[in-house]
Amino acid sequence: MLIAEAGGNTMTTAVGSLMDVVSTVITTITGNPTLMVFFCAGVVGIAIGVVRKLKK
């Protein structure tokens, strides 16, 4: 196996693992109403900040 092949395989595995973690987090957040409120409040706050910057 070439070094480039090993690096590509490792990167693919790492991205796959990251996607599994993100999927688990999103599933947990959407399954819990309290977490959903805190998550949405943060997203709304970010959206308001972006809109304010775009208006300037």
Image (cartoon, rainbow, N blue to C red):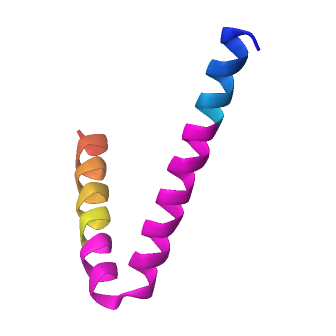
Identity of the residue drawn at 49% across and 68% down: 24
Residue at the extreme bottom:
33
Tell me if residue 32 comes above or below residue 21 in the rendering: below
**Residue closest to the eye, 2 or 56:** 2
Identity of the residue drawn at 32% across and 73% down: 40
**Highlighted magenta segment, given as a residue range:** 13-40
| Residue 14, x across and y down, in percent | 55, 39
Identity of the residue drawn at 62% across and 39% down: 13
| Residue 43, x across and y down, in percent | 31, 63
**Residue closest to the eye, 6 or 21:** 6
With 36 as the anchor, is 49 left or right in this view? left
With 23 as the anchor, is 52 left or right in this view? left
Q: Quadrant of the C terminus?
A: top left
Residue at the extreme front:
1
Residue at the extreme right:
1
Secondary structure that dominates the magenta span: helix
Identity of the residue drawn at 67% across and 23% down: 8
